[in-house]
Image (spheres, rainbow, N blue to C red):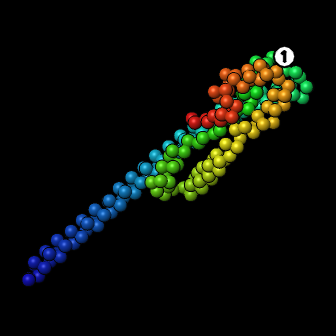
Amino acid sequence: MDSKTLRRLVAELLVVVFGILIAVGVDRWNQGRQERIAGERYVEALAEDLAADTVALGRLVGIYRAREAAGQRVLDAIERDSDFEDDPAALASDINYAGYVTSFKASDFTYRELLSTGGFGLIEDPDLKRALVAYYQSVEFNAQFNPLWVETPRAYYRPEVRARVAPADWAAIETSELGAGGDPLDADATLDD
């Protein structure tokens, strides 16, 4: 093989190697760009989920303030040793409304998707990652207590009320419209949005 052919083969080999290196570099750049775009989309979706949680928690605070007022009216009636004949319908409403528990369910679809697909690594900010994990772990931890909270508020005043109310009025209390199917034990509702 003469030197001219050898130079031509080396040049062609260098062109092929250089072309492969460029293609690999462009592919890596493109993959990195796609991962950054996917990470940004996940962060936007997480922000929407957290905004929805903020709205839901705000509503939940309002619900619990109203329930606290209803519970206070029932407790006031018990403390004044009332015979509850003033307004049994209002009492029925207050007992049922104050005793029901509305639990919070976080909008965690995006977070769970990130965990299940291994996409959590697409989020580059370590502080954001830590905050997300802490938030969703605390939501999950608190959710385990929801069944325990269902009857807890009622347990304090229902026996007192039942002992002081006529049987017909008690039946009205247990079947009031605010009761879940009239079953005082079916007292859990969930705030899903």
Q: Where's the N terminus, which quadrant?
A: bottom left
In this image, 7 relative to 136: left or right? left
Question: Is 151 rendered above or below residue 19?
Answer: above
In front of the other: 94 or 44:
94
Is 170 situated left or right of 111 in this image?
A: right
Q: Residue at x 81, y 36 (%)?
A: 156
Secondary structure of the residue carrying tag 1 is loop
Give the quadrant of residue 71.
Answer: top right
Q: Which quadrant is home to the C terminus?
A: top right
Tell me where residue 32 sits by quadrant: bottom left
Camera-nearest residue between 19 and 83: 83
The one nearer the camera, 88 or 18, is 88
Q: Which residue is mark 1?
A: 86
Which residue shows up at 56% across the image and 41% down it? 107
The extreme top residue here reads 86
Seen at 63% across and 27% down, the residue is 181
Picture coordinates of residue 161, whole percent (x, y): 82, 28
- Badge 1 crowding class, 10 Å Cα cut-off, few under 14, some 14 to 19, many 20 or more, is few
Image location (x, y in percent) of residue 41: 46, 46
Above or below 106: residue 130: below
Amino acid found under the numbered disc labelled 1: Asp
Q: Position of residue 138 (x, y in %)?
A: 65, 50
On the image, the x and y values in percent for residue 56 come to: 62, 35
